[in-house]
Image: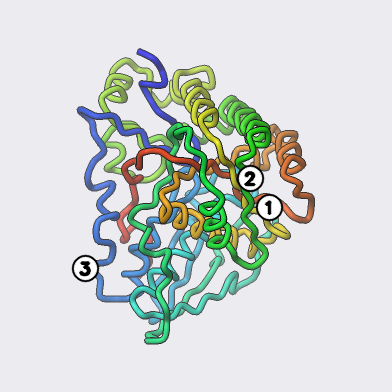
Amino acid sequence: MKRRSFMLVLAAGGAVIALPGCDAMPSTATAPWLAPGATETDPRLRALSWALLAPNPHNLQSWVADIREPGLIRLSVDLQRLLPATDPPHRQVLIGCGAFLELLCQAAAQQGQRAEVTLLPEGEYAAGGVDARPFATVRLSADASVQPDPLFAAVPLRRTNRAPYTAKVPDTQALLHLAAAAARPGITLRSSTDATKVQRLRELAIAGYRVEFGNAATWTESANFMRVGAAAVAAEPSGVAVTGTMAWFGRQLGMLSPEALRRTDGVAARTAIDSSTEAATHTHAWAWLSSADNSRRTQIEAGRAYMRTDLAAAQVGLAIHPNSQVLQEFEAMSTLYDRFHAEVGVAQPARVQMFVRLGYAARPEPAPRRPLGRLVRA
């Protein structure tokens, strides 16, 4: 049995492995994707039902929504859902929170609600981490003049697609569409389909996989968020879902026990490297979101920009997959971090916030999501 047929990708920002047969993805884990908010009467809950579908690091869904004050949503980072090894300053988690915020605002506009957003209302987080203070407050009010965002129609279609892409290269018009959609204060999306540039970026991405997946601390962190088997995914529909017939056999053979998963020389880590490398090899377009600075406010804006990029990709039929390894700030990645920024011509105080693969592939099934009640404080 080849490893790549055993598991597609185990850890690249919250992968979903769904193989046909027994031990399939439980329907409860993907239920939030079906008619979000249809049964809710509070416009805040309807908007939040859509927002929870936002992309986020390792599929941790690291957000909390407090709606105890009428008309207000207070958004905070879930401090139990962080990645201290791979994301020491919690920058990536905050980008995920920005994506959540953007989708929340779009969902509110869709129902004729104006969203008044205040970022970091109790002050900016320290450079070394986040805390219990809100990253944003959102006050909703009915306003017939609010125009829905055309990107919102693509929400049910958006996916993070980790598969190898076809040889078809995205055209200039599609890439310009993404760049226009990504426009947020201080954020710029750039891309390349030049074969020589693509190859250099591919090599950096592959080197990043080898560092993250081969490092004991960062790999263990990813392994700890793997939900192996339908029962585990149903119990905790977040993190890395590993389901399907081969996953079932892997459990029976002890290849996917918690101890085996954490080994950097085990089948899971080796499969992650092999499968990610294969996906990068079959990538003919890369894009990156750059910011003028690296403030916490900017990181949130980067998340909003990425959410818009993701939806724009779904609109034009492009597959998209974050490859954030070379952007991570743990010590072992520092050399690649510098090489990558030099390659794309971004120097301090500016930095790259997101690095993604673009291309064409069959659309995968949606990733698991926790039910709305798990993230709301009411």
Give the left or right position of residue 235, taking residue 135 as reference: left
Residue furthest out toward the right: 348
Q: How far is the residue under mark 1 from the one under mark 2?
A: 7 Å
Which of the 4 image quarters holds residue 344? top right
Question: Which of the marked residues, 3 or 2, is nearer the chain's N terminus?
Answer: 3
Question: Residue 128 bears which disc, if any?
Answer: 1
**Which marked residue is nearer to the observer: mark 1 or mark 3?**
3
Question: Which of the marked residues, 1 or 3, is nearer the chain's N terminus?
Answer: 3
Question: How packed is label 3: few (under 14 Cα within 10 Å), some, or many (20 or more)?
Answer: few
Q: Is residue 121 above or below residue 130?
A: below
Q: How far is the residue under mark 3 from the one under mark 2?
A: 39 Å
Which image quarter is the C terminus in?
bottom left
Tell me the residue that label 3 is attached to. 39
Q: Nearer the viewer, residue 251 or 110?
A: 110
- The residue at the point 58 percent across, 71 percent down is 119
**Which marked residue is nearer to the observer: mark 3 or mark 2?**
3
Q: Is residue 94 visible?
A: no
Identified by mark 3, the residue type is Thr
Tell me the residue that label 2 is attached to. 88
- The residue at the point 67 percent across, 33 percent down is 196
Position in image of residue 370 (x %, y %): 33, 52
Q: Are marks 1 and 2 in contact (CB under 8 Å)?
A: yes
Q: Is residue 73 visible?
A: yes
Q: Of helix, strand and loop, which one carries label 1?
A: loop
Looking at the rendered structure, the number of numbered marks drawn on it comes to 3
Identified by mark 1, the residue type is Gly
Question: How packed is label 1: few (under 14 Cα within 10 Å), some, or many (20 or more)?
Answer: few
Q: Is residue 311 above or below residue 65?
A: above
Q: Is residue 56 above or below residue 143?
A: above
